[in-house]
Amino acid sequence: MRAENGKFQSGHLHIQGLHGNVDLKGSYDFDRQAGKLDVLTGSLDWQDMPTLPAGWAQVHLTGAIEQGHVKLLGNQWQNIQGKYDLAKGELKLRKLRGDIARGVITSNLLKLTPAQNGLQIEGKLRANSIHLSEIASQSTWLHGEMRGTLHANLQLNGLLPATNLADWQFSNGDILIYDGSWSPSPIASSVTEKLGISTPAIHTYVFRKLEGRFLIRDQRMLATSIKLKLGDQLFSGKGRVNAAGDIRGTLSDGGSNVWRLLGVWPQPEWSPTP
């Protein structure tokens, strides 16, 4: 390592702290608060990060990430690669690639901005072969457990952790899930169940394929081009879920049979139309 007149330079510097460790190479100018630092390898637990220090938004860093590992929302992101640019409190990730839940996430440009109540995220993501059963914290935002293999193209603009539709206005995307199942969280409806004397029944819905397009707008999630394959039967339709969880929609088997989608998320119901 070489330091002279407020300028630092190193071909390989290892830093280890309470919240992770990193191997770096590059240079940094302390007077300008700017530099180019490549991450050779590093690990970080985002959930365990302390409050960012005053003045961090004035720092400007650029560089490459050769291999990174991040724990975020209980999930392990492995083998992260790409280019980064940190300026004015915003982290831009370009040509991003990372492994999660035995699948791959890629993005040409992803913007991350730390906020008081979470992490603001904006950009396009592509997901391939994500095993949903290995994604942690599902119950927080899905109120249930989803299984299957996910493929998706997503345009995201929202706040992590995801708890409110209003925080994800105009996010949209196409989703495809193979060999999936859905087990909603039980809702205690009777007096004895609310007292914990009996356990509410848990229903699991199994499907061969589920695909569709979604858009979040005006505190509603709109789902179009839905295709649901149950065994040898193929259904298509559309639906919506509002901020209160009310479900409305229709599904058709392509003939004269049409079902109405009803209920309150995460307890969907359907019934044949008259």
Image (tube, rainbow, N blue to C red):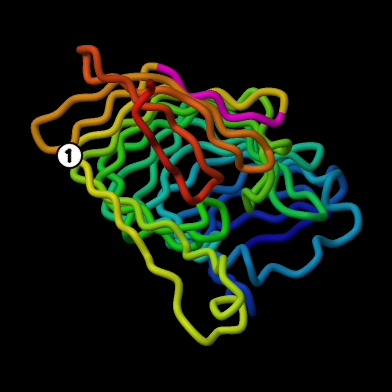
Label total for image: 1
Q: Position of residue 76 (x, y in %)?
A: 43, 62
The secondary structure that dominates the magenta segment is strand
Residue type at mark 1 is Arg
* Camera-side residue of 232 and 61: 232
Residue in view at x 54 percent, y 46 percent = 265
Q: Residue furthest right?
A: 54
**Res 61 seen here:** no
- 39 over 192 or under it: above or below: above
Q: Residue furthest bottom?
A: 197
On the picture, is 272 further left or further right than 173?
A: left
- 41 over 192 or under it: above or below: above
- 14 over 127 or under it: above or below: below
Tell me the SS state at disc 1.
Answer: strand
On the picture, is 62 further left or further right than 254?
A: right
Q: Which residue, given by chain and number where applicable, does mark 1 sit on?
A: 208
On the picture, is 226 further left or further right than 137?
A: left
Q: Quadrant of residue 240?
A: top right
| Magenta residues, start to end | 219-224
Q: Is residue 241 magenta?
A: no
